[in-house]
Image (cartoon, rainbow, N blue to C red):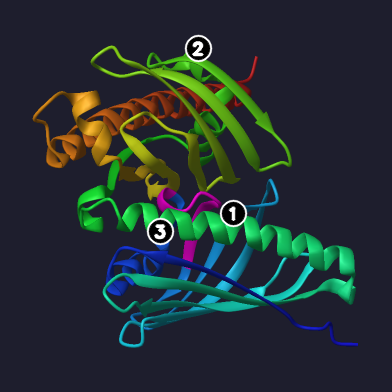
Amino acid sequence: MTPRRHTAEHTLDVAARPEVLYELVADAAAWPAVFGPTVHVRHLERGDRAERFRIWATVNGAVSDWTSRRTLDPEGLRVTFRQERSRAPIAAMGGEWRFEPRPGGGTRLVLLHDFAAEDDDPETVRWIRAALDRNSAAELDALARVAELGHPAREVVLTFTDTLRFPGAVSDAYAFVHRADLWARRLPHVSRVRLTEEPPGVQDLEMDTVTADGSAHTTRSVRVCEEPSWIAYKQRITPRLLLGHSGLWEFAPGGDGTTVATARHTVLLDPSAVPEVLGAGRTLADARAHVRDALGRNSLATLRHAAAFAASASESASESASGAGTSA
């Protein structure tokens, strides 16, 4: 028997133009820095009007993932979505974002869901509704917060990338970043680490870091690990200057025994924190430069140490192979 379809609707009035809110929803790649529940979005197909991606997000306190298709309608100010592979106990899920202009200005945000539960179990239906209520409210509030900052999204959302190529195996470079529990011993800018991994591939990481100016920060992140290709993370506790921060470590063969490692950051700046953190008279442009330098410096330092680790592992493997090939 086909499970019964259920519906849910969540709305919020926001003091911002519909186009501003639409652009934030349409840019799924920036969601981990904007939306609290979203950990990582990985595009599988991407066009002007349609896209397909795999998404990792917290659902009732645990990280889950699924694959969705979306249709983008900028003229109609609508985004429709449908999960093509839902995670149990959800049998099916889809919905629509609407951005309705309000008389006198502003926008009514409307987030619609339709869903089915496996076996149509009433307890499962309640569980799904609870997750939708929690995540939808968080997403609507996040959109309002960003749209009402008083700055265009391009000024407060910043994405940048650093890349390093070095001799060594992809698996060794990945292992260095994956074993963040050892970073306090391996990385000079990390002073304390607490790491748990449950289930395998999903990590909770808390650490204290020191930036070049001597300031210390405590951050807490959830990380999704896809061995040996990439590790995505989303900070749950961010420094004062940031409202959101997500990142991605990627590792790929570079040819001739080398690895190409990339560190990507997407951040959401807090304009109200700029004078407090950087000083009176400093601007968002100063904040972007400061964050770019501080985060880029630390991620490049991590990549350089990963490169040294991978090179050392490669040399050790070569020496072992050479020794095994000699005769007494």
To which residue does mark 2 refer?
185
Residue at the spot x=20%, y=40% of the render?
A: 288
Q: Quadrant of residue 300?
A: top left
Q: Nearer the viewer, residue 47 or 120?
A: 120
Q: Which residues are magenta?
A: 33-43
Q: Residue furthest left?
A: 281
First reached walking from the N terminus: tag 3 or tag 2:
3
Find residue 196 and report its horizontal and vertical position in percent: 67, 29
Q: Quadrant of residue 13?
A: bottom left
Amino acid beneath label 1 = Ala
Q: Quadrant of the N terminus?
A: bottom right
Find residue 230 and report its horizontal and vertical position in percent: 50, 47
Question: Is 104 displayed left or right of 258 in the figure?
Answer: left
Distance of label 3 from label 1 (alpha carbons): 17 Å
- In this view, the mark in front (2 or 1): 1
Residue at the spot x=41%, y=49% of the render?
A: 33
Q: Quadrant of the C terminus?
A: top right
* Residue 236 drawn in magenta: no
Residue at the spot x=72%, y=64% of the render?
A: 129
Find residue 312 and report its horizontal and vertical position in percent: 46, 22
First reached walking from the N terminus: tag 2 or tag 1:
1
Find residue 28 and report its horizontal and vertical position in percent: 42, 64
The residue tagged with tag 2: helix, strand or loop?
A: helix
Amino acid beneath label 3 = Leu
Residue at the spot x=30%, y=87% of the render?
A: 75
- In this view, the mark in front (3 or 1): 3
The residue tagged with tag 1: helix, strand or loop?
A: strand
The numbered mark at residue 143 is: 3
The numbered mark at residue 275 is: none
Residue 232's place in the image compared with 50, above or below, is above
To which residue does mark 1 refer?
57
Residue 310's place in the image compared with 152, above or below, is above
